[in-house]
Image (cartoon, grey):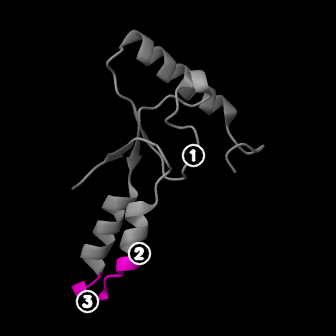
Amino acid sequence: MYFGLNVDTDSLVYLMLANSFLHRKFPNIITIAEEVSGMPALCRPVEEGGQGFDYRLAMALPDMWIKVLKHQSDEDWNIADMVHTLENRRYITSIFYVFI
């Protein structure tokens, strides 16, 4: 899925070039990727073959809370699903959380 023939390599190379340029031109810049598929190497440096983002935006948490708070009563909350959503992260990836 991530490294097969269906990957848009031109887009990945563009992201690598953009992040490489931005980090060289503006050393204190922070780039954040909104991505939900778990793309490997998204937050790895370009020098290591990654796309060079500093953080991955964790969109699953706000989406989960919106769904739970809007559509479920307190008694119907599935704690196992909540724990899974909270723990479902790539190992050693910097995560950026947004709370509404």
The mark that comes first in sequence, 2 or 1, is 1
Kindly identify which residue carries mark 2: 81
Identify the residue at horizontal 54%, vertical 50% (top origin): 38
Question: What's the residue type where badge 3 is placed?
Answer: Glu
Residue 22, numbered circle: none
The mark that comes first in sequence, 1 or 3, is 1
**Residue 25 position by quadrant:** top left
Task: Determine crowd level at label 2: few under 14, some 14-19, many 20+ residues with C-alpha closer than 10 A.
Answer: few
> Residue 42: horizontal and vertical position, in percent?
53, 38
Q: Which residue ends up furthest to the right in the rendered image?
A: 5
Question: What's the residue type where badge 1 is placed?
Answer: Met
Q: Judging from the image, what secondary structure is the residue with disc 2 in?
A: helix
Identify the residue at horizontal 30%, vertical 75% (top origin): 68
Task: Determine crowd level at label 3: few under 14, some 14-19, many 20+ residues with C-alpha closer than 10 A.
Answer: few
The quarter in which the C terminus is drawn is bottom left
Residue closer to the observer: 54 or 62 = 54
